[in-house]
Amino acid sequence: MAADHTLAHSVAQGGPSSGKGSAAPPAVLRLYTWKRPTISFGRNEPVLGVYSPDSDQLRNIDLVRRPTGGRAVLHDEELTYAVAVPSRALGGARETYRVLNHALLNAVRSLGTVADIHGDPNERALPLSAGPCFQSPAEGEVIANGRKLIGSAQARIGGALLQHGSIMISGDQTLLSTIGLSTSHHQPATLSEQIGEVDMERVVDAVVGSMKKCFGGGWAEGEYSADEKRMCTQLVESRYAADQWTWRR
């Protein structure tokens, strides 16, 4: 979460500092998996009284609160994506959400899934009390067989928009229902149920290829700058590793 936040801040500032006169990238794509099963809470999601930090079922689960909104996600057997763009580059928050979700839709379709975009543009957003993220799809999200396949959330960080989310490979979100107050056991769609055995590198290539078509322009792999590494460490220490942040609501 600290790395995603840092990259959005860097985009808002015009790109990573890499020397006077260097060209700043207009956007950043980051793809990653998690070393341990982790629950991420939405930035303003109420969790006190809903989830218990002392639950025995959480002993082998890491917990973090995202910089973005939305509801709880169990990150396990999935691919997480993060995109940071200048806030007006794609026409604002709603248009950025639409463009990126269609890019993700095209990525999973290229893998052989039968997927679509959920909902009506006039559909009201689900409240934060509606249960875990993958319990039900929101308008604009990628679905398969009527169930959410990719969950996404946004935040404005300075002059940048950060959108990140989970592409379900074969993950199960049941744990969120068993440790919380929700009694629903609705499960997400997964790539494995759609296409069988999943090669993670193939999924990564599909997402990168689709994003390149979405954005166009030149692409290059990059490393974190010294300033970005420093900011990321500071954000971990001051926010994302702190119980006061994770359990603030």
Image (tube, rainbow, N blue to C red):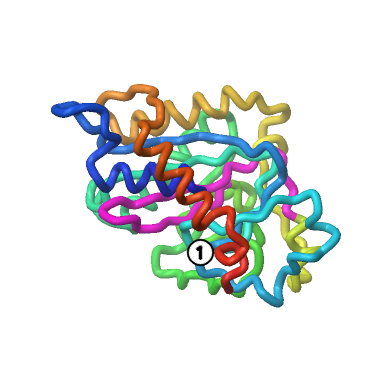
Residue under label 1: 43
Q: Residue, x 52% and y 49% (percent of image)?
A: 236
Q: Quick check: 98 left or right of 143?
A: left
Q: Position of residue 69 (x, y in %)?
A: 48, 62
Q: Nearer the viewer, residue 162 or 215?
A: 162
Q: Position of residue 89 (x, y in %)?
A: 23, 46
Q: Is residue 229 magenta?
A: no
Q: Quick check: 14 left or right of 35?
A: left
Q: Residue, x 31% and y 44% (percent of image)?
A: 85
How many labels were placed on the picture? 1
Q: Residue, x 58% and y 66% (percent of image)?
A: 244
Q: Position of residue 173 (x, y in %)?
A: 73, 53
Which quadrant does the C terminus fall into?
Answer: bottom right
In the picture as drawn, the residue positioned furthest to the bottom comes out as 49
**Location of residue 34 (image quadrant):** top right
Q: Nearer the viewer, residue 131 or 231?
A: 231
In the picture as drawn, the residue positioned furthest to the left comes out as 21
Q: Which residues are magenta?
A: 150-173
Q: Quick check: 14 left or right of 244?
A: left
Element at label 1: loop
